[in-house]
Each structure stands twice: as C-alpha cells, then as structure tokens.
Amino acid sequence: MRLPRHSASKQTGQLSPALRAAISYRMLTTSTINANSSSNTKNPGGIACLIIGDEVLGGKTVDTNSSFLAKLCFNNGLSLNRIVVVPDETDQIVAAVRQLHTEFDHVITTGGIGPTHDDITYESIANAFNLTLQHHEPTIALMQKLGIPQPFIMNAGRLRMANLPHPATITFPNPDSLWVPVVTAAHSVHIFPGIPRLFERMIVPFLETNIVPSTPVTGGAFIRRVVGTDKPESEIEHILRRWQADLNAKVAAQQTNVASPIKIGSYPKFGGNERVIDIADGAHRAIKVVVSIVGKDVPEVERVACGIRDEISGFDFREIVIAE
C-alpha cells in the first residue's frame, strides 16, 4: 500500500495524523487478512454505515440516519451489517472507511461535508484511497441554480462543498430540487450529508436505483412476526434458545436459506402499564416480552412464530395501549 506523502513533524518528532492513520490501517488490515487468509473476508451483499461527527459522540446530536437506513435496508431485503461512529478526525475516518471497504460491498457515510473547518469527510476519504480533490463544475452549477436564497452567491465555504474526491462517481438523487451530490469513491463508498432531512431525501432514491440492483438479494424482502407474552424472559428463554438452536442446525445442514437465516429476538417491556390488543379476540392483554421472528422464508417464519406462541402461551398483537 502506498503511504500518503506526509512527513513526520520536525518540531515534535511525531508522525502526522494522516501518516499515523495509514500505518495503523496497515497494521489493522494485515492482522485481519492474516486471520482470515483461508476465507473470503468480503461480506457478499453486506452494507455498513459510517456515522461521522463529534456531535454524535458528544451527545449533542442523536443519530437517526442509521436507524432510517436500517429500516430502509430491511424493507428492501438488504442487510445492514454494521454501524460505526467516528469523530471528526482524519486518522479515524481514514482507518474506519478503509476497514469497512475491505469487508462490505457498500459503505454509506453520513456527516462532515459542510463548509466549515471541521467538515473533513471529503478530504479524509480522498486521503484513504489516494484520490485528489477537485472542484466539480456540475455541482457548482446546480448549487447556483437551486441554492437558497437566490441569487446564490458562491464564496469559499460554498465552493468547499463542491471540492470532491476525484476520480469518483457523482450522482444527484434529487436534481430538480436538491443540489447536494452523492459522491461514490473507490466504487462502493457512498458519501452522504449528515442532516437527517437531506439524508432521508437522498438515500431512498439512491438505494433503490444504485444499490438494490447491484446487490445480491436472496429470497426477497424480510418479514417480521411478533408474539407477545405476559411471562418474564427468565421463564421463556430456554424455549427461545431451543428454537434458535434448531434453526441454526438447519442452516448448518443446508436445509434452509443459508443467506438469510431466521433470527429470534426477545425484548422485555418494563413498567407494568403496557397493554396490547390481542388480534384473536380484541382483548387488551398485559405484555412483558415481545418475541420477534425475522427471516425471508415466509412459511418457515410463520411455522416458528406459531410454535413459539403456543409454547410460551403467547398471542399475536397489534398496537400498544397505555393502561390508565
């Protein structure tokens, strides 16, 4: 791997942040590759989300982008396999995006593409893949056309938002109403803004047009069945454990969809005042645990859900009702 052309600091005798990141990345990826040298480390069809921002790690901003992306992937039969949060620091962005790029088919980043000094995502990702930064004239033109207020006067900060990694693929998911581009570096690292309303407007058409067609989806969309029970988790855990073990054994024996195995989750409800509506008879029932069954094989998901429901004296339900 060719290291960036940054020298160590002569005054302090320390390595520059970019050089430290490159060395750290080399050490990290070398150990990862050595540990997996006998298998393919790439996760076929896998998607990772990289959240960039001090404000998320500092608690000032609540990240909703990864949650929105997770639901969008689920509804399209895709797997969001990892969510990583890093600060606005070049070395950490470089190391994280390189590592995720080696493991997943698509990496979606959010945050750090504004006009201020701490918006360093474009330059960090350019550094990660030995790219340059160039002003992208179509982005500048669209910014001038759609930017608010009009006339949209270009200044140094606005030009900085059009200084994009090169070479890269530039896509405008909303060209009639939004000038912000999606920059795709290294073929599969897709750079999005961190502002939720912008991210949501852009990721929906981009995912449907650019990621879904290029991602192997086995078995169609995911489905989720939920079963409620008034029993505590401690009384049903052995039942859920046995069901999951049986499902895992089927996968190991190649008797079911290996690419999308069924997963059982258990989620306790605390507080004692929650009721749900039993679909069977419309009665309000107390609920202590929600059991979730997720998969793509509809008959198998239904079989598992019905079997678990019977064993835990559970019930199918809909909306939560808060008891008085």
Image (cartoon, grey):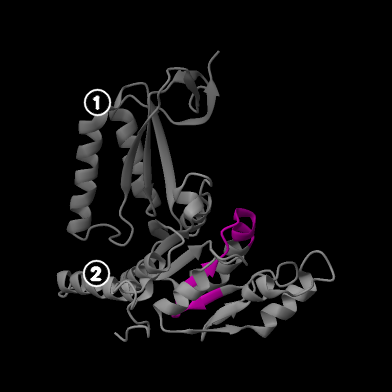
Q: Secondary structure at mark 1?
A: helix
**Residue extent of the magenta highlight:** 183-201
Q: Which residue is mark 1?
A: 234
Instruction: Answer whether residue 154 is visible to the viewer in this image.
Output: yes
Q: Amino acid at mark 2?
A: Leu
Tell me where residue 149 appears, x and y as whole percent.
Answer: 82, 64
Q: Residue furthest front?
A: 11
Front disc: 1 or 2: 2
Q: Is residue 269 above or below residue 13?
A: above
Q: At 21% from the left edge and 38% from the top edge, which residue is drawn? A: 241
Tell me where residue 201 appears, x and y as whole percent.
Answer: 64, 60
Check disc 1: other Cα within 10 Å, few if <14, some if 14-19, many if 20+: few
Report the front residue among 34 and 300: 34
What distance separates the C-alpha of mark 1 from that of mark 2? 40 Å
Q: Is residue 46 above or below residue 232?
A: below
Q: Residue furthest top?
A: 324
Q: Is residue 176 above or below residue 283?
A: below
Tell me where residue 177 appears, x and y as whole percent.
Answer: 75, 67
Residue 106: quarter of image: bottom left
Q: At 30% from the left edge and 59% from the top edge, which residue is drawn? A: 257
Q: Residue 183, which numbered label? A: none
Q: Residue 28, which numbered label? A: 2
22 with respect to 161 (left or right): left
Q: At 67% from the left edge and 78% from the top edge, which residue is drawn? A: 139
Earlier sequence position, callout 1 versus callout 2: 2
Instruction: Answer whether residue 220 is visible to the viewer in this image.
Output: no
- Is 76 magenta? The answer is no
Report the front residue among 121 and 37: 121
Q: Residue furthest right?
A: 151
Q: Amino acid at mark 1?
A: Ser
Q: Secondary structure at mark 2?
A: helix
Quarter in which the C terminus is drawn: top right
